[in-house]
Image: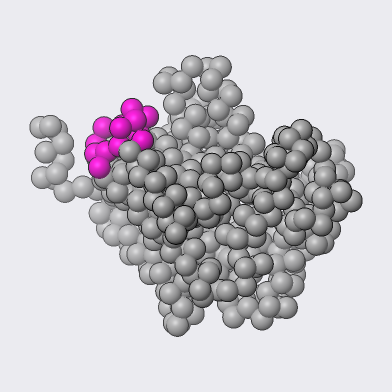
Amino acid sequence: MIDLVVSTCYALLLTWVIYRSPFFKVEGLKSIHLSMVFLLKVLAGVTLFLIYTYYYTDRSKADIYRFYDDSEALYQLLFTHPKEFFTNLFGLSNDFSSDGKYAHLMNNWQLPYDNPMYNDNRIVIRFHAILRIISFGSFNSHTVFFSFFSFTGLFLITKTFYQFIGDWKSEIFIGTQLIPSVIFWTSGCLKESILMLGMGIFIYSIFNKKNIRWNFRGLLIIASILLILLTKFYIMAALLPATLGYFISQKFKTSWQPLVYLLSIVLLGFLAAFTHYIIPQINFLEILAFKQNNFVNLAVSEKAGSLITTTYLKPELADIFLKSPEALFNTLLRPYPWEAMGSIFKLIPMMENLFFLFFIGWIVWNHRKPTHLRFVFFSISFVLVLYIIVGLSTPVIGGMVRYKVPALPFLWVALLAFAKRSESYQQKLVLS
């Protein structure tokens, strides 16, 4: 009962904040619509809670519970050893690591296998530990706050999109916030909720240099980069070449800009591939191969029904290059219709894929030249790189569907930029 009361109170409070706060005001969007979308995200988060509580009943394997349960140990230090709470919260102590004195109190702070990557479980555990201070033991109040983090990030992305495409505002809002996979996987107590907050701050800060003071903007960019790296570092790997291409391309004519973006991807790709010759401790090829190999092993042991391949990715540039086209193809098109039968978690993404393919076909027939090509290329660059990374590292359709979600709003807005509106609508815009 207390879970229902506390989570409802926080949902209403944050809805009021969204409705009344100047921060959430933007031309073309009504406050009531923003509030309704937030409540819809909370509902999606609660749906996620119900699925992982009553359908997938193994709490130890459910992402929404694993990190929440572990956070209890860190939270309790606030009352027993306050100094240790803050030092572990900010990464100044290692009391929960494998050789730490509190290691036995957590199951996910330390991964059960050698891992060349940063353990991104910890950022979620820390967020939960902080929220426990005000949640009064209510799990779904965490659901509400995680949904709010995601909503805020997606709102900032929407606000940024509006600067570049002014005649599809309602469609931008719908596509950014309400694509089914986006609203499902970025609501509730998942890493994606924190990730979208980081992405929103990064995108908004990068493209709003006139509206934000330079010193504050710099702090926001640094904070957002850290948040993205600590949550899902490969998202930053996809954003970097797009960002580099965007700023370099302003020095070139429009006809040269696609080449600039391509060269940015190639340059940073080679830099990542050979980083270990400069810093031996960092080998991005091994990290990518490790993630894929471990995913294959886990899928085989769990007998995952949506396993695409059992072929191991080699930590070699040639192998990654040869497998990239297939990786892009898989991420863009799968699950196929015959692979989606019997599972709503595959059926909905399959329908999204078909929708995007039909939309691309319609644009080929009824297209226009975008007014802000540099931003369109930025979005396309981010989508392509992320799709390739996801396709290379994720051999399971279920994981692929989830991990490509951050790219979907950018794919949507890039396609909208090429979509031509009717003549009557254009005249209304001019008259207004």
The vertical placement of 193 against 224, above or below, is: below
Magenta highlight on residue 146:
no
The vertical placement of 351 against 126, above or below, is: below
Q: Which residue is drawn at 10% across and 32% down?
A: 431
Q: Is residue 386 left or right of residue 165?
A: right
Q: What stretch of residues is rendered in magenta?
A: 17-32
In percent of width and height, residue 168 lies at 26, 44
Viewer-side residue, 56 vs 230: 56
Q: In this view, does 414 lie to the left or right of 201?
A: left
The vertical placement of 256 against 142, above or below, is: above
Q: Residue at x 10, y 45 (%)?
A: 424
Q: Is residue 163 left or right of residue 333?
A: left
Is any part of residue 418 visible from this angle?
A: no
Is any part of residue 110 visible from this angle?
A: yes
In percent of width and height, residue 426 lies at 16, 40
Q: Residue at x 60, y 65 (%)?
A: 62
Q: Residue at x 57, y 29 (%)?
A: 221
In percent of width and height, residue 25 lies at 31, 32
Which quarter of the figure is the C terminus placed in? top left
Magenta highlight on residue 29:
yes
Which residue is most to the right? 99
Viewer-side residue, 41 vs 313: 41
Q: Give the quarter of the image for residue 223.
A: top right
Q: In this view, does 396 lie to the left or right of 281?
A: left
